[in-house]
Amino acid sequence: MAKIEFTMPDDFMEKISRLEERTDEVLERVLEAGGEVVLGQVCANLSAVIGRGTQYPSRSTGQLAGALGLSPAELDRDGNMNVKVGFDESRADGSANAMVANVIEFGKHDQPPKPFLAPAKSKSEAACVAAMQAKLEQELDGI
């Protein structure tokens, strides 16, 4: 069986050791920086598809775009810290924003799909990782 051994650079290890009990607050800011990148892409994609290419005049009220947001960083049941890009639920008419977003994303029998979430995920992945790396470096430099 092969054995691989590597050591972390000393300057990186020094920064990590100074992080100590501030890990959770730093990770929250790092995740939020990445989440903001994804949120921006979802918002841009949603704006590009709402009311475009419809058979009938658009009935868009702006509620869906207004409900789009980023959750605070939270621990899940597996102990992983996450932020989520999504929609607040209540609409003025009582329907759920998630249902409206689902119809736009996947379509329905008389409405073709207009994907905006899935493309945002793939398009923003590299920029999200870069933003989180930059934020982590900034946070570590400030310690």
Image (tube, grey):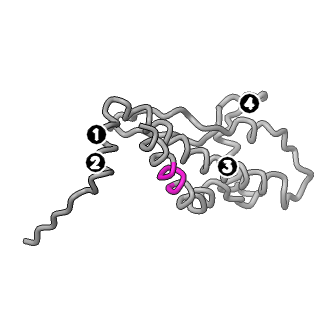
Q: In this picture, is 83 found above or below 120?
A: above
Q: CA distance from mark 4 to mark 2?
A: 49 Å
Q: Residues within 10 Å of mark 1 (few under 14, many from 20)?
A: few
Expressed as whole percent of the image width and height from the top left, the position of residue 40 reads 67, 49
- The residue shown at (63%, 46%) is 39
Contact between marks 3 and 4 (CB within 8 A): the answer is: no
Number of the front mark, 1 or 4? 1
Provide the major secondary structure of the magenta segment.
Answer: helix
Q: Amino acid at mark 4?
A: Arg
The label shown at residue 17 is 1
Contact between marks 1 and 4 (CB within 8 A): the answer is: no
Q: In terms of image quadrants, where is residue 97?
A: top right
Element marked by disc 4: loop
What's the magenta region? 129-134
| Magenta highlight on residue 93 | no
- The residue shown at (56%, 34%) is 71
N-terminal of the pair, mark 3 or mark 4, is 3
Name the residue tied to disc 4: 91
Element marked by disc 1: helix
Element marked by disc 2: helix
- The residue shown at (38%, 31%) is 22
Expressed as whole percent of the image width and height from the top left, the position of residue 53 reads 84, 61
**Quadrant placement of the C terminus:** top left
Expressed as whole percent of the image width and height from the top left, the position of residue 108 reads 70, 54
The label shown at residue 13 is 2
Number of the front mark, 3 or 4? 3
Name the residue tied to disc 3: 40
Q: Amino acid at mark 3?
A: Gly
Q: Residues within 10 Å of mark 2 (few under 14, many from 20)?
A: few
